Amino acid sequence: MSETNQELTQQFYSRFQPGTSELLAQLEILRNSAVTVDAVEKIVVDAAKLRKELTDAIGYLPGYDRRQCENKLQDIETQVEAIRVSAAPKSKFAFKRKTAKSTLVPSPVTSTPTGSSAAPSSSISHASGLSLSGHSNSYLTLTSLSSPWSAASDLTISDLDHCVVNLIPSSANPDAPADLTFNALHVRNVTDTVLILPILPGSALLHDMKNCVIALGSRQFRMHTSERVDVYISIASNPIIEHCSLIRFADYPQQLRPASTDAAQEVKSNYLAVQDFSHIRATPSPNWSELPQDQNLPGERWPLQGAADTKALLQNLLPVS
């Protein structure tokens, strides 16, 4: 029995220690950058998972180990709560100040729901982000975005079907700056689509993708409830998947990087250091794998030129069933 408890303890630590280290690293990143709701929410969720792990391990963890883990997790939860509390008022006051400045005579406008919602939509477009939504069988570029591109914007992509999305400097985006990027990325409900995106300084949160290809770089990557997706990514942290299947990972293609990128300054990508929160075991996860080299899209096959026949183009790009 003691041998079984020892094995369980070792398995617990193999998950708990990397998990707490990752949370502390994310907290440090938040302290040195703009705090977003999504970033805080991600840490809250991750901390809750570790809390559940610790609760489930109470039956076999030695008392001393249990107290040490409890203290460490409590410290992380305290830090998370402090960041959440400090961030919440900041965003609310920022919206109010901007609304007041854009409506020099605010009394009739701010007193009605219609006025208060209309004013922020124009005055805080950079804060609320850009969107690309509701397209089928289309080749989409920067001109398809909800408003002109801005480096200060988050990007939301949703409800796409059989599309190619090209948002990097290329012949299809002739006026795009060489340093084009977005703060963060949110993707939801995308099917049979190829997403070609730049390297982002922030996080990428993806939900409900099916039979897709996505190329991007990000500081953090998290994918939920998705299946049959090829992910070409440049990332310094560990990619995270949950409730996913048939996800394949490869490095971000050199051909998609800005021409000005210095190879010597590129950070080594951890694209194969994937954490599967639906498979917290010592055995390899069956839900993801490395994309075989012979199935990687070569540089000349990435659709950067635009295309009249999107359907035919996708047949040569999407994952093989």
Image (cartoon, rainbow, N blue to C red):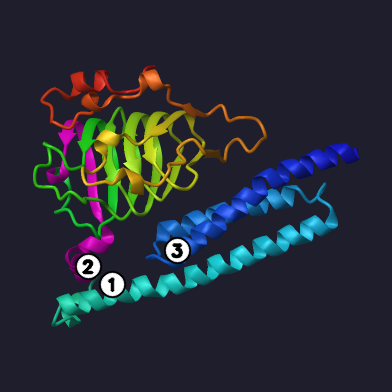
Q: Secondary structure at mark 2?
A: helix
Q: Looking at the image, is mark 1 or mark 2 earlier in the sequence?
A: 1
Q: Position of residue 285 (x, y in %)?
A: 58, 30
Please tell me whether residue 138 belongs to the stretch shown in magenta.
Answer: yes
Q: Looking at the image, is mark 1 or mark 3 earlier in the sequence?
A: 3
- Between the residue at mark 1 and the residue at mark 3, the CA separation in whole angstroms equals 21 Å
Quarter-wise, where is residue 128 in the image?
Answer: bottom left
**Mark 1 near mark 3, Cβ–Cβ under 8 Å?**
no
Amino acid on which the number 3 mark rests in the picture: Leu
Q: Secondary structure at mark 1?
A: helix
Instruction: From the image, tell me which residue sits under label 3.
Output: 30
Q: In which quadrant is the C terminus drawn?
A: top left
Decide: few, some or many residues near mark 2? Use Cα within 10 Å; few <14, some 14-19, many ≥20.
many
Instruction: From the image, tell me which residue sits under label 2.
Output: 120
Quarter-wise, where is residue 286 in the image?
Answer: top right
246 sits left or right of 151 in the view: right
Decide: few, some or many residues near mark 3? Use Cα within 10 Å; few <14, some 14-19, many ≥20.
some
Q: Looking at the image, is mark 2 or mark 3 earlier in the sequence?
A: 3
- Between the residue at mark 2 and the residue at mark 3, the CA separation in whole angstroms equals 25 Å
What segment is highlighted magenta in the picture?
Answer: 115-143
Decide: few, some or many residues near mark 1? Use Cα within 10 Å; few <14, some 14-19, many ≥20.
some
